[in-house]
């Protein structure tokens, strides 16, 4: 499941650095990307919200948006929104133990929403608490 959130519309200035072409100019970026991803990868579930993440948004509202995401990527140029999303994602993510070079026993937060296995190390099992 992928959730795209963006309150901006695509304009001509975005075309050079955006996967969406000029057919999408004037449309909301999240809506356009959801349509593009769904046609490019039909097996993925793509939801979108045509809104900005703001400081004024209550934690509960942001948590509801982020809940259930397998991966959270804050691909915005708004630094305060990036920090806000990161803080909320860290609160939602379960703690898992990692055992990699020099990190034995330290705890990290990963956005793991159900039981999963690491592809590089199949004996490493991740699960939500």
Image: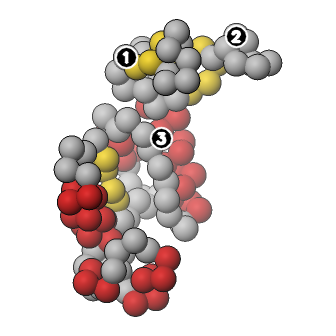
Mark toward the start of the polypeptide (3 vs 1): 3
Q: Which image quarter is the N terminus in?
A: top left
Q: Residue 50 at what x, y percent from top left? A: 27, 66
Mark toward the start of the polypeptide (1 vs 2): 2
Label of residue 57 in the image = none
Q: Which residue is mark 2?
A: 105
Residue at image coords 59%, 62%: 79
How is the protein colored in the picture? secondary structure
Q: Residues within 10 Å of mark 3 (few under 14, many from 20)?
A: some
State the residue lying farthest toward the bottom.
Answer: 12
Q: Which residue is mark 3?
A: 88
Q: Residue 48 at what x, y percent from top left? A: 25, 57
Q: Is residue 45 visible?
A: no
Using the image, determine if residue 122 lies above or below residue 48: above
Q: Is residue 42 left or right of residue 116?
A: left
Q: Which residue is mark 1?
A: 115
Q: CA distance from mark 1 to mark 2?
A: 20 Å
Residue 54, picture quadrant:
bottom left
Q: Secondary structure at mark 1?
A: loop
């Amino acid at each position: 499941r992928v959730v795209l959130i963006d309150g901006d519309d695509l304009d001509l200035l975005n075309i050079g650095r955006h996967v969406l072409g000029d057919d999408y100019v004037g449309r909301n970026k999240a809506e356009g990307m959801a349509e593009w991803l769904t046609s490019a990868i039909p097996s993925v579930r793509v939801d979108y919200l045509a809104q900005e993440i703001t400081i004024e948004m209550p934690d509960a509202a942001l948590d509801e948006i982020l809940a259930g995401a397998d991966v959270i990527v804050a691909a915005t140029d708004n630094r305060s929104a990036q920090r806000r999303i990161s803080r909320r994602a860290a609160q939602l993510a379960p703690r898992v133990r990692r055992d990699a070079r020099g990190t034995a026993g330290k705890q990290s937060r990963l956005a793991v929403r159900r039981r999963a296995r690491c592809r590089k190390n199949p004996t490493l099992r991740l699960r939500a608490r």
